[in-house]
Amino acid sequence: MLSRRTLAGLAGAASLPRFAIAQADNRPVITVAVQKIAITNTLDLLREQSNVGERTSTLINERLIDLDWFNGITQVPGLAQSWRRIDEATVELSLRRGVKFHNGDEFTAEDVAFSFSRTRMFGDTRPDNGQSLPVSSAYLIGAGSKELPAEIPPVARRAFPALRGVEIVDRYTVRFVNATPDVTLEGRIAANGSEINSRRGYDETDSWLAYARKPVGTGPYKVREFRPDTMLILDAHDEYWGGRPPIRTLRFVEVPEVSSRVNGLLSGEYQFACDIPPDQIAEVQRHPGFEVVGGPILNIRFTDFDKSNVVLADPRIRQAFSHAIDRTAIIEALWSGRTTIPAGLQFDFYGDMKIADWRVPEFDQVRARELLRQAGYKGEAIPYRLLNNYYTNQVASAQILVEMWRQVGLNVELSMVENWTQVRDRSRPRGVRDWSGGAAFGDPVGGMLNTFGPNGAGQATGEWRNTEFDQLCVTIQTSTDRALRKKLFRRALEIAEREDPAYTVLHQNATFTAKRRDIAWRATPSFVMDFRSSNWGNAIRD
Amino acid sequence: MLRYLALRLARAALTIVLVVTFAFVVLRLSGDPALIIMSPEAPVEAIEAFRHAWGLDQPIWVQYLDYFRAIAHGDLGVSFRDGRPAIELVSERIPATLALTIPALMLKLGVGIPAGIHAALHRNSTSDRLVMAGAVAGFTVPSFVLGLLLVLLFSVQLGWLPSGGQESWRSMILPVITLGFGGAGVLARFTRSAMLEVLGQPYIRTASAKGVPWRQVVRGHALPNAAIPTVTVVGFMVGSLIAGAVVVESVFSWPGVGRLLVVAVSNRDLAVVQCILLLVASTMVASNLVVDLLYGVLDPRLRAGATAGAH
C-alpha cells in the first residue's frame, strides 16, 4: 500500500522531466497577420496556385532543389545534396540522408517517386500529350476520396510537360527522366508544385482534401491545425535537418482589413503584419518599435493588350500606349519609390539567359503622338476593364495611366468590373487590362514564354498571338543550345514588347511586411516567409 | 385565424424562393467560380475540368432545376472550396456569430428602449437632448468607423482589449459594443417617437385627468401602445442575428457567418452563399411572422380585425 506522501512524491517525480522540457523551450510563439492564408483553403501548391499559398508552403514542405532567396535566387541543395546531368533529358539527384518527415519517417527515394507519381500529381495525363484530362470523373473534393481533384493533373503537367517519370536508382538516388531534352528540368524541380510529401503520411490519410490541409513534409514547421479562412497553426519540427527552428509555435491569422492588421501589430497581438500597402508604410514607421520590410518581388505588373480589338489590331497604337507611360512617376507617386522598373518581362534569376541590355519602351510622348498619327487613330474609345485593387494600387495606377494616355491623344474608357470573368468577357469589345506575371523558375520558359506562348493564358483568352513568337517558344523550350536560346529569347522580347506588343511592362511588383523592429528577420523578394534559424535572430544580426 | 396564418406562411415561402432565385441568377451570371478559385493563370484545361466536375458547364436553367431538386431533398449543396456540405460549414460559424449578435441585441434592448422611454418622458430636457445626440451618433457613425475608433483607443492606446480574433471572452467586448451601439440608437429613436405619439393621445390625458398615478399611466397605457413600432424594429434585429455582423466580423477578424459570406461571395462559392441566404431569409421571415402575431397580442383591435377579416 502506498502512502499519500509516496504517491505525491511519485507524481512530482513524474512531472519533473516534462516541466524541465517546458522550461527549456523558451522559443517564442509568433503570430503573423495576413490578408489571406489560402485561396482554396488547402496547403497544396498544385491546387493553391496563388502568391499567398507560397507564403506558408515552404515552411511545411520542401523541394529537392531549394532557392537561395537572399543570393540572387540561385539554386541550392534542398532535400537533394547534389545533382548532375546524365543526358539532355535526364537529371540524377543524390538525396540528403537522415532527413525526417513530420511523422518521424526517414525521407527516401520512395517519397520522391511518390511525390511525382500519377497518384499524387499527373493522373491520367501523358508526358507527350499534356492536354489529356480525366474530365469525365465528376469528382468532388472532400467526398472521402483519394482521387486527385480534376484540375491538378493539368497544373502538374504544365509544370512538367514532358516528364516521363522518376526512377529510383537506390534508397538515396533518383533520376528525373524527361520525354524530350529540357535544359530547364532542374528549374522545374526547384519550382512551386515540386514539394516532397511523405508517402506513408498520404497513405494514412482518409482523403486528398484531408491531406492537403495537413500535409506531412520535411520542412521546419509541421501543421498542428488549419482552420480554413481563419488560422493556420504550425509547431516547430525539432528534428529538422536544417537546425532547430527558432520559433516554438508559428500562427498565421487571417485579418482581412489592413487597418486591423496594423492595429493588431501596434497593440502587440501580432509580431508580423503582411500585405501592407505602400501608403501605410509611413504610418507604421511613425511608431519607433516597428518597421516595414520587403520590396520588389519576383512578379511584374503590366498592361495587357487585346489584339482582336479593331483599334488595337494596329501595332502602332499599342506602341503608342507603351511610350505614353511615365513609369517613374507612377513608382514615385504610388510606391514611394520602393519598387523598380524591370528590364522587360524578365528577371535577374534567369542568370545568363537574361538579356541584360534590354529596356522597356522609353517614355516619349512625341513619339507616341506620331505613332497615333501614322496609324490614323481618330480617338475611338478603347475599353479598360478594371478590378477593384486586385493588385496593390491597381485603381490609382489605372487612373494615372488613363490620364497619361489621354495626354498623347488616346481615348481609354475605364469601367469597373467585379471579377476575372467580367474582365475577360468576349461578348463585349475588350481593349486593355491589368495583369501580372512572374517566373516559375530561372529561365524564360518559366516566365513570359509560358504566359504568352502557344499554351499560355495570353493566347487561351484570345488576346494575342504571333506566329513567329510561337515558333520561337517551341525552339527555346526544346533546344539545348544556350547561345541559340538566348538569341531567340531576345527576338521574342522584341516581338512581344516592341514590334507587335502583347503587353507593356509597368513596374516590378512589391510586397511589404510590417514587424516589430527588435525581431531580426529578413523578407525574401517573394511572398515566401523564411522562418528557419538561418533567417532569425543572431544568425542575421550584424 | 388559420387562414391568416396560412396566408402568412405562403407569403413567407414565396419570399424565400424569390431570394434564393435572385441570388442564384445574379451569382451565376456575374462570375465564374472556376476562374476565381483557380486563378486566371491556371491552365485552360484545369479550368474546364473544374467546371465539368461541378456541373458549371451545364445551362443555367439545368443548374437551377438541379439546385431546387436538391433542396427538396434537403441537400443544400457542397462548397467548391471546401468540398464539405455547405450547411455544415455555415452551421460551424453560427455559434461564433450568435456569440456577438445575441449580447449585442441585449445591449440594444437594454440601453435603447429605456433611453428612448426616458427621453420621451423628459421631452426637451437636457437628458433628452443628450440621449438623442447619442442615438443619432449611434446610427449615423458606420460600424467600421466606430470599430476602428474603439480599437485605436482600447487596444492600441490603452492596451486593455484585443483588437480582433477570437482568443478569449475579452475579444468579444469591442465587437459587441460596436454592434450594439448603432442598434441601441435606432431603438432609442423609435421608442421615443412612439412614446411621444402615445403620450399625446386623448386616452392618456383622460387617464391623468381621472387621477391615475402618472407611473401607472405610463406602464398601463403608454408602454403597451407604444410597443408596436418598437417590436417591429426589434423583429428586424432578431431576423438579422445570423448575418447582421458582416462588417463588424471583418473589422475584428471574427470567424462568423458574416465573414464566411464575404469570402463565399468573392469566391462565388455558390452553395455556401445560397445556404446562408436561405438561412437569413428564413430567419427574417420567421421573425416577421412572429412580429405579426405579436401585433395581435399587443393590440386586441388588430386581433379582432384579423378574425373579422377571416369571417
Image: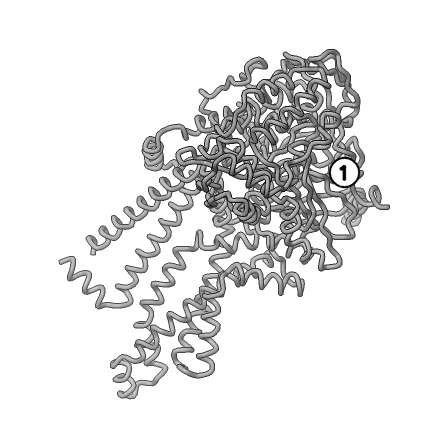
**Residue B24: image location, x then y, percent:** 37, 40
The residue furthest right is: A542
Residue A422 versus residue B134 in the image, above or below: above
A389 above or below B150?
A: above
Q: Residue at x 35, y 73 (%)?
A: B193
Image location of residue A415, percent across then percent down:
46, 45
Residue B255 point in image, percent of width and height: 54, 48
**Secondary structure beneath disc 1?**
loop
Judge by depth and name the residue closer to the eye, A482 or A96: A482
Q: Which residue does the image show at 18% across and 64% down from the upper left?
A: B305
Count of marks overlaid on the render? 1
Picture residue at 39% right of the left edge, 78% below the top: B120
Image quadrant holding the C terminus of chain B, namely bottom left
Chain letter belonging to callout 1: A
Asked whether A438 or A400 is in front, the reply is A400
Observer able to see residue A265:
yes
Screen quadrant of the N terminus of chain B? bottom left
According to the picture, the residue beneath numbered tag 1 turns out to be A532
Image colouring: one colour
Query: As drawn, is A396 to the left or to the right of B230?
Result: right
Asked if residue B169 is positioned above or below residue A75 in the image, the reply reads below
Whether residue A247 is situated above or below residue B163 in the rendered picture:
above
Residue A41 seen in render: no
In this picture, residue A135 sits left or right of residue A528 = left
Dot 1 amino acid type: Arg
